[in-house]
């Protein structure tokens, strides 16, 4: 193919029908000429690892104590945390320190959930949101102000995130803490601190109850 042919291909790719970013076309149903115009999205698994959130206690205090264990255990080195001493007159967390700086680089994050496992105060958990995209690298680095839940305990909805109903429920951290794995004596016992907007969550049902076997 000569120079002219390559130039023609480029022109075709920039036509109205071949834009890089387009509206959802409808999926397989649409392409196969079915009456249904869109594919229905399947329910997300209970333990899906999605976008992180920083949680608060029921009284509104932040759970993060700036211990940096999540950053230390992260295999992708995508978390940056710096702690700071609490102001005795106006503390941010119940402990001596709080997470003054908290950043997650989602260009590196592999959603392994190891940060959730390492956190001693259940401060960081993962929602079921995974459909988010960025137009620049700066948006991909989430800061504490974006990760921290709002005054009602709900994750913040940023412009580039496609939140769907239920994606802020039953985070992976909650599943880990209450799942009946390990010693059977602890089955059904909730060892989970109260959370703003959620309170004390109920324990996860046993595997046999969920699968009907």
Image (cartoon, helix red, strand yellow):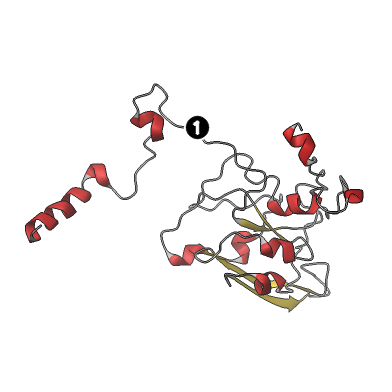
Q: Nearer the viewer, residue 195 or 3?
A: 3
Q: Residues within 10 Å of mark 1 (few under 14, many from 20)?
A: few
In this picture, residue 198 sits left or right of residue 35: right
* Residue in view at x 57 percent, y 41 percent: 164
Which residue is the site of mark 1? 40
Residue 17 point in image, percent of width and height: 25, 42
* Residue in view at x 13 percent, y 57 percent: 6
In this picture, residue 13 sits left or right of residue 172: left
Q: Is residue 134 above or below residue 36?
A: below
Q: Nearer the viewer, residue 9 or 148?
A: 9
Q: Image quarter for residue 149?
A: bottom right
Residue 102 point in image, percent of width and height: 64, 69
* Circle 1 SS class: loop
Please identify the quadrant where the C terminus is shown.
Answer: top right
How many numbered discs?
1
Residue 13 point in image, percent of width and height: 22, 50
Q: Image quarter for residue 100?
A: bottom right
Q: Nearer the viewer, residue 147 or 107?
A: 107
In this picture, residue 74 sits left or right of residue 136: right
Residue 135 point in image, percent of width and height: 41, 59
Please identify the quadrant where the N terminus is shown.
Answer: bottom left
Q: Is residue 56 above or below residue 19?
A: below
Q: Is residue 19 visible?
A: yes
Q: Residue furthest front?
A: 213
In this picture, residue 41 sits left or right of residue 27: right
* Residue in view at x 83 percent, y 71 percent: 95
* Residue in view at x 60 percent, y 69 percent: 103
Q: Residue furthest right?
A: 185
Q: Is residue 14 visible?
A: no
């Amino acid at each position: 193919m000569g120079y002219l042919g390559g130039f023609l291909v480029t022109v075709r790719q920039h036509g109205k029908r071949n834009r890089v970013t387009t509206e959802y076309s409808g999926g397989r149903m649409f392409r196969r000429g079915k009456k249904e115009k869109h594919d229905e999205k399947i329910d997300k698994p209970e333990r899906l690892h999605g976008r992180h959130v920083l949680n608060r206690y029921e009284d509104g205090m932040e759970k993060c104590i700036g211990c940096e264990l999540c950053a230390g255990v992260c295999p992708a080195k995508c978390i940056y945390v710096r702690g700071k001493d609490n102001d005795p007159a106006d503390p941010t967390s119940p402990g001596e320190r709080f997470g003054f700086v908290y950043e997650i680089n989602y260009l590196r994050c592999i959603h392994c959930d190891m940060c959730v496992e390492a956190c001693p105060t259940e401060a960081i958990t993962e929602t079921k949101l995974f459909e988010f995209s960025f137009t620049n690298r700066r948006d991909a680095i989430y800061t504490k102000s974006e990760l921290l839940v709002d005054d009602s305990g709900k994750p913040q909805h940023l412009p580039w995130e496609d939140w769907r109903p239920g994606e802020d429920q039953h985070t992976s951290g909650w599943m880990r803490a209450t799942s009946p794995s390990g010693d059977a004596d602890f089955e059904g016992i909730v060892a989970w601190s109260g959370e703003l907007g959620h309170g004390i969550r109920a324990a996860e049902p046993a595997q046999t109850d969920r699968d009907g076997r």
